[in-house]
Each structure stands twice: as structure tokens, then as C-alpha cells.
Amino acid sequence: MNLEASDWTMHVPLARFGSDIPWMNGIEPPMNKHPRSQGNNVLPELAVVHAQASGEVPHAPLGVDSTAEFAERVGAQFILVEELKQKGAQYQELASAEQLLIEMMHDLRRRAPKGRPSFQEVPLELGVHADIIGKLLRDPGTHRMHRLARPFQIELLRPQQEFNTRLFAVLQDAHNQLAVSRYGNVAMWIRQTLEPLAEPGAWQPQSHRLGLAAWAVRMAKRSGLELLRSNLEPIFARMRQWNLQVIDILCAAHEGPLITRAQAEQMMARLAQVADPLPPGLTLPEPLHAALLLQREFTRHTHHALERELALAPALSAEEYRQWCATREPLRISEATRQARLLARPPTFSVVVGASPVEDARHWRECVASVLAQTHDAWELCVAGPESLLTELRRQLPVEQARDSRVRFLPSAPRTGMAGALNTALSASRGQAVAFLDAADRLAPHALTELALSMRDNPTTQLFYTDEDRLDDMGQRHRPFFKPGWSCDMHRESNYASRLLVARRELCEELDGVRDGVEGAELLDFILRAAEKQVPITHVSEVLYHRRERPRAFQVVSAGAHAALSQHLSRCGEDAEVWTTPGDMLRVRHRVQGTPRVSVIVPFKDKPELLAQLWNSFREKTARWDNWQLILVSNNSANPRTFQFLDTLEDPRILKLTWNHPFNYSAINNFAARHADGELLLFLNNDIEMVDEGWMEELIAQAQRPDVGLVGPLLLFPNGLVQHAGVVLGPSGFAAHPFWRYRPDEQWTAFGRIDHTRDYLAVTSACVMVRREVFEAVGGYDERFRVSGSDVELGLRIIKRGLRCVYTPHTRLIHHESATRRLDAIPDRDAWLSYAAFRPWARQGDPFYNPHLTLSAMNCGLRTDERTVDALAVQMLAWELPATLGMVGPG
């Protein structure tokens, strides 16, 4: 069946939506997960570098402009060469342009020498530990007897080394989803790859000698090993069992629905029992014992990687966090103190504590001690509450603290609760700014110093909040929360900005302090009332508050919180209600206004099974909303089964279009948008499956909000792990999805929770809704991007117009990502365009990410690579892109 000849299709000549730049050929549908697939910014015009007509290739001298700026020029030249090829330029013109590009690429590499990979989800250190033979050979402290036994050590370890090395490669491809696009059935591929290597005693001795000498050496090695086999069998049994269990764990992580947390923990517990290849009580010669210790080190590091595959372990352990603090914080405290000495007029702070019973007197003493230890001297501590409670708190303090003139105890009126206590302290306070502190919590020693510096740098800001962490029962710090910039939607559902909260005195007076009637949610209410006045709110990205761990520590659900949030929504004139989620969290549910028509745009190329899955789930889960238009856009489909399926779709709300040109995601969607008649446009990948009944209503309600430009939902992989919960700029120098491959019910990450509505600079176009007038006002998708990056670039243009990009976790869809294309088939052109688009934002950083979080992965771990966003991007462009490698080699 010919698509154009079908009686239900229409063919419209190619036209561009709001772009005067020629579209380029493409071969694959869009992908918005891996950093190589993300664009980043409002795209400046690329300055085209023209080749000299004479054929002479000018050489750009080092130091004329920055490396980052020079990379933009290289990108412009790359695109020029592509365009010359496309239009069939004369040989001399094209050859000159290509030669100039090669010279510029060499120049870029001289400016930016090859470094660590720009993006590494599975730590490279695991690959180092997998190379147990290499570690053995590099050991400078090996005893002479060990060196004599070295050939037997190597042959003993060789089979396991091969398994380890292949396991590391499998972990990399499986975690990054490349295995899905390359092999389809990942579990089968894992077994076929690793099971033949799982026998640690399958020796194949080797020799560097030739001929008869080589044969003699191999026989001698084999004979020696066979003599030891019976003694080594208990070791091999444990190693064999460990290898096979690792295979089972990887298959469980990538086959069908994800196993439960309890099942995963049981699998990891069984693996831990055989992680040590040395059975208890077994005595071995020292050379063999030393060799097997290297394998034990590898199994230890692999354990954490496997926990990540099962979505058990956070990216940041308590020990890693404490080491990070010990390494970084002394330097930061010293630098902040040095800068504060230069302040012409240091601000004064009133630290306000609403007195409440403290379970452990030590916590209260530590609280006061943390204020006394501030590196900023201009402060007072105002403690207010009932007289009897103040007497008890004063008694619990050491004499010198209780008598310190800067520590003031202020009785509040009887039966006025926490609001009365805080307002008493606020009324009596004398500082230029007020910091709110709980009686059991602690301030970092440089907390007020950092706030003083931020007040200097942000003179119009009225409200400040900082990052925080938790204190366990032993007073040890853990569970840091590296927060995003201000997001009112996120604060409504999480109260994340309440610690450490600092307000200028003028704001406290304007708001008339805290309000009564919202018991337990005084600061949530205070911040929301400040936000209603649209006062500037600044995030200070340092961990300056240590909150005592309490049961349900992150829960904000209470009668007071419900009241505060409901009243806030009413004052804002928002038609919304406050719900409590099944996980006991607050949720703001906006109501749909009217019955707007939604045009759902789905580009596709064949894959009728995916279209059937999408249509069946769409029809079932959208039954409550019938005012829709479904636009199916065929791009070079050729499978007869595709057309047979399309012929079965007879609903008059379905519009079937044909766009038979080389693939260009942006152009296809712009083309379809011109044929849409809905007030709202929903761009949808053909590998999406609906699972929630009210998914459409949630997206509509969010998209109708006047200040929202784009809205994207939570997308899950088929096994239930997170594929998309927003897009952040910076990782790998481009963009990525935070919370990648976490369980959606994950209770905590260093970037907070997954189940809160958030602001981002962009959301993925795999499923995104936008009001039609917004889409048209910004000119639609930029058709210079063929496969990836256009969704992020669109989000940035919408942000620039003063609108917001919102992620909602309150509806979930399944994204069968990789079902329609290869994840590693992203055009280099899109990477260069994304880089140019990103740079204006790179200098200031993504406000909705945190500068202390990693730029080398998507797991919300700590940032340990200090390379800048520009440096990471140039590393990828100069050393990692396929076209670059083909042009100038691996280097």
C-alpha cells in the first residue's frame, strides 16, 4: 500500500514553522535522555566561517579568543560543511571548507587536551578495579617471592579478569540504555555475554614466546595450576557463584517489571555472602592470597554499582558525604571569612528560636553553641516562649552561655503557641535580618557569614534560603539536600525553603510577622505570603543548616499546612485544591478550566505495534476527556502492516498526515502543528503508553495556568524506573535528566524527592503540552535541530519570555525509550547547535539545579569533577563525537 495514494492521507509540501534556516536531513526520531541528545539554550546566530576561495587554510592562533568561543566557531564551520555537502557544492569549495574544519579541530584539541570522559554514569574507577592483572603488575611493593610466582598469579586471575572486564562494559551499556537500542532483549544479551565467562577456573595459559618454547611454557603453567585445582576449588566455587548471581541481578534489573525493594535487598544480601573469594578458615600461600585480595576489592566496588542498577542505593552515601564535607568545608569557611572581612558595613542578624520542648538537652546546648561559634560576630540570639519553658531551657545551658548578653530569653503571652513565641522574638529583635532556627538544630559555623555575603551581592533580595542536611542520633551529618533555585510550586508541596530561612527586617514588618492559625506550618505560610508579594527570593547554595532527624522528617502534611496552602491558593485566585498524596505529602491539584480542545501530535515511522499500543492506551485512559484531536504524522513509513493498522482507525477526531522527507523532528512537529485545531498542543512520542486515568486532565490544568509555558509529566521506563522527571542544564556540558533510573517512590536523593512539582528550564518533548498561542508566539521548534536538542531550546525561549516550564509528578506515563531508534545515533550537528545554544546560560548555571551536584552523571550525586560546563562540553565536542573521531582520529 502506498502511503501517498491512500484515500485518508494528505501530502503537504515541506514548510518551516517560524524558521528561515534550511532544515537538514535526519534519520532517527527524537531522544531526550542522554546529554548528547540535549540542546540547551536560546540559540544565538552562528557566525559562519567561510573558506578562502584561494584554497589557503588560515590557522586560528592560540589565545585570540577563549577556547569556548573558539569552539562555537568550529561548530559554525562544521555546519557550513554540512550545508555545502547538502547543496552539492563544487569540489574546490567543499574541499577548502573541510580542510579548514580539520585544521580548526586540531586547533581546538591543542587548546583543550584530552581529559576524562565528559559523562560517566558507571564510575571509571570500577574499570580500574576490574583490571586485577593490571593492578597486580603495577604493585611496586611486591615481594621477590611474589614476583617469582607472578606467571601463576596472572594465569590464576586471567579468566576472572575477562569476566570482570566484560561485566564493566555490560554495566555501562545497560545503565545508559545503549543495550536496549543495540540488542533489544537486554536480559538475553547479558546472559549471552557473561555466562560463557562465568567459570573462574577455565584456564587458557598464554606465553609471549613462540613455537616450542611457547608450548612448553603453557604446559608448565597449566600443570602447576592443575596441581592446585583441588585446593582452589572452594575459592572457584565462591567466585563462580558470585559471577552467576551478578548475572541474575543484572537480568532482574533489566527484564520485565522491576522487582520489589525487598526482593532486591535479598538478592544483594545473598551476593554479599560470596563477595569475598576467600572462604573463611582457608589458608593459602601468600602470593595466591595477595592475588585474590584484588578480586575482593573489585567485588566490593561492584556491589554499589549493582545496587544502583536495582535502584536501591542513592548516588551519595553518608561516608562519601562526610568525606566531601571534610575536604571542602574548611577551605570554604576560610574563604568566606576572608571575603566577609572586606564588607564595609557587615549586616546584623537576629537568630530567632521559638522555644519548644527538646527531647535531649544536648541538642539544645549544641544549638546554642552553633550560634556562639559563628564566624560572623554581629548577631543576637532571641529565644521566645512560655516563661516556664524558658526557665528550663536556660537551666540546661552552661553558665557562660546562659549569661552571654547576646543570648536573650523573651517570655511570650500564654497560650499563643509557636506563632506567639516567634512574633515575640521578632518584635524584640534588633538585627537587620532575621534567621529562623529550631531549638534542636544547628547552624554551620559560617552560616551568617555566607548570608552576609549574599545580602551584599543581592541587595534587592528580601528572603534567603540555604541548603541543609540531617543529624542522626549520634549527631553525624548525612542526607544532604542540595536544593534548586526558587520554585513556588515545589515549595507549596515540600516547604523546602524553610531552613535555613533568613528575611530582611523590612519584609518581617511588612508581613506583620508569622500568622496564627497555621500551627506547625508558620514558616511555610510566611514564605508563601512573601511570594505573593513577588519579593525577590535567593537560594544560597551552601549547606548552612543541620536539621535534627525526626520521624517523617520531610513530611509537611498537617492541619496547619493544609490551611496555610489553601488560604494561599485562594488569595492568589487559583482554582485549585490541596490534597494529601498516598505517601502523606501535600499536593496542589489545579482544576481544568472549561473544555479546551487538545491536539495530540504523534510523528512515527512504521512500528505499527507501538502505534497500536499508544492508541489502545490512549483510548482507554483518555475516556474521561473526549475533546481531543489525534494527529498521526507518517514519516517515510513503508511497512504494509502500518497502513493496515491506520486503516482501522476510523474515529473522526483522528487526522492522518504524511511528511515524506528526511527525518527532522522539529520540522515534522511544526508541520503538524499548522494542521492542529486545538487550543492546546500535546507533542507525544509514538513509544509512549498511558497508565493513569486522569493523565490528560493533569496536563491540561497545568498548561492552562497563565504563567506556565510548558508542562511535562513523570515518564517511566517499562520496568518502572524514572526516565524523565525534568531536564537540567550542565551535565556533560549539555543537558540531562536528573533522577535517572531511580524508583519513583524513592524517599530521598541529594536533590530532593521525585514526587514534587518543580520548575525546570526545560522538559522533554517525548510528552509535553503547550498552549497554542505560546507555541506560535515563540516560533515553534527550531528546525536547525534534526533529532535532539530542540525541546530544550524551545523551553529556553519560553523561559526567556517570562513563562515557566513545569514538571508534574502527578501523572505517569510509560516511555518505551529506544523502541524507535538507536540512542547512539544522534547527529553531531545537533551537538554543535546545542553547544551554541547553551553557552549564554552556562556562564550563570542552571538555577533549578545545584552547583554542588555532579555534571558527570544523571544520578544527583556530588560534584567531584571541578571542570566547568564549557570544559566538559568542549571535551565531548573535541574528543568524543563520532564525526570528530572520524575526522581527526581518537588522539
Image: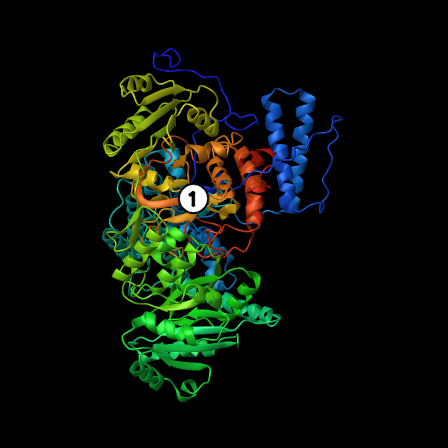
Q: Is 116 left, or right, of 510 in this rendering?
A: right
Crowd band around label 1 with a 10 angstrom C-alpha radius: few (<14), some (14–19), many (20+): few
Q: Quick one: 557 or 763, which is closer to the camera?
A: 557
Image coordinates of residue 303 in percent, x first then y, are: 35, 55
Rendered position, 766 above or below 23: below
Q: Viewer-proximal residue, 825 or 361?
A: 361
Q: Is residue 262 left or right of residue 604?
A: left
Q: Residue drawn at (56%, 25%), measured in percent from left and top?
A: 22
Q: Residue at x 76, y 26 (%)?
A: 54
Q: Which residue is mark 1?
A: 707
Q: Is residue 118 visible?
A: no
Foreground: 90 or 837? 837
**Which image quarter is the N terminus in?**
top left
Can you say whether 700 is above or below 544 in the image?
above
Quadrant of residue 835 in the image? top right
Residue shown at 31% from the left, 19% from the top: 646
The residue under the point 44% across, 28% down is: 669
Tally of marks? 1
Residue 350 vertical placement versus 781 (above, below): below
Residue 358 at what x, y percent from top left?
Answer: 30, 76
Q: Which image quarter is the C terminus in? A: top right
Image-based side of 84 in relation to 401, left or right: right
Q: Is residue 238 left or right of residue 365?
A: left
Give the colouring mode of the picture: rainbow
**Disc 1 secondary structure class:** loop
Residue type, numbered disc 1: Asp
Q: Quadrant of residue 276?
A: bottom left
